[in-house]
Image (spheres, rainbow, N blue to C red):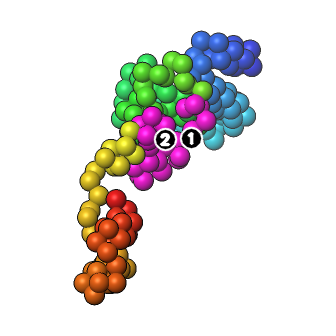
């Protein structure tokens, strides 16, 4: 009779409790083993079969299920709890949309681009966030343009300075003309 109940619990756990089913099955198997041991060693297990023993075993099993329930709706990267529809499935766990935005994944495109996120792992996302790397090509291009738009410093290299001084001496000595000096100066400065 106990075996039939065990199989019914396993079947109903797989059918109705998809995410928590491994833990329900684990609890059912542990309780089944407990009843078998209780039947075999009834005299030596009188302390555990008493009410305090059953309470202790029940609390341990509830703690195991409670831990999974606590961890179930948490982001694997930041650990914060979110609603169920605010996650993206990656290869080895779930990541919240805030963590995906931090590495440059456009949240508005998620319904059409989910296959891109499923190739990432939690470890890769943590590494990308740690190094502030952007993986979205559009955001990477915008960051490049913003960096490129910053004015470059007008410092000259030592070679450019010595070349310009040499040209000025040649101009002062009359060896080259002003037009030659201006052309060479533009060439050295890259203007």
**Which quadrant of the rendered structure holds the C terminus?**
bottom left
Counting from the top left corner in percent of width and height, residue 87 is at: 45, 26
Give the side of residue 162 with respect to residue 134, left or right: left
Circle count: 2
Q: Are marks 1 and 2 in contact (CB under 8 Å)?
A: no
Give the side of residue 37 with respect to residue 109, left or right: right
Q: Quadrant of residue 96?
A: top left
Residue at the spot 51% in from the left edge and 18% down from the top edge: 111
CA distance separating discs 1 and 2: 14 Å
**Circle 1 crowding by C-alpha within 10 Å: few under 14, some 14–19, many from 20:** some
Magenta stretch: residue 137 in it? yes
Magenta stretch: residue 39 in it? no
Residue 135's tag is: 2
Q: Report the front residue among 186 and 90.
A: 186
Label 2, secondary structure: give it.
loop
Give the side of residue 109 with respect to residue 168, left or right: right
């Amino acid at each position: 009779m106990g075996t039939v109940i065990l199989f019914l619990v396993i079947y109903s756990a797989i059918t109705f409790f998809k995410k928590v089913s491994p833990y329900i099955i684990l609890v059912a198997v542990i309780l089944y083993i407990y009843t078998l041991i209780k039947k075999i060693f009834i005299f030596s297990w009188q302390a555990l079969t008493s009410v305090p023993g059953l309470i202790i075993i029940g609390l341990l099993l509830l703690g195991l299920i409670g831990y999974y329930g606590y961890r179930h709706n948490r982001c694997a990267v930041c650990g914060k709890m979110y609603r169920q529809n605010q996650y993206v499935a990656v290869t080895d766990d779930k990541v919240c949309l805030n963590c995906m935005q931090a590495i440059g994944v456009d949240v508005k495109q998620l319904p059409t681009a989910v296959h891109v996120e499923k190739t990432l792992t939690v470890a890769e996302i943590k590494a990308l966030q740690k190094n502030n790397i952007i993986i979205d090509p559009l955001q990477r291009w915008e960051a490049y343009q913003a960096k490129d738009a910053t004015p470059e410093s007008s410092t000259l290299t030592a070679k450019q300075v010595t070349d310009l001084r040499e040209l000025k001496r040649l101009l002062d000595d009359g060896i080259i003309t002003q037009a030659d000096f201006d052309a060479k100066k533009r060439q050295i400065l890259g203007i």
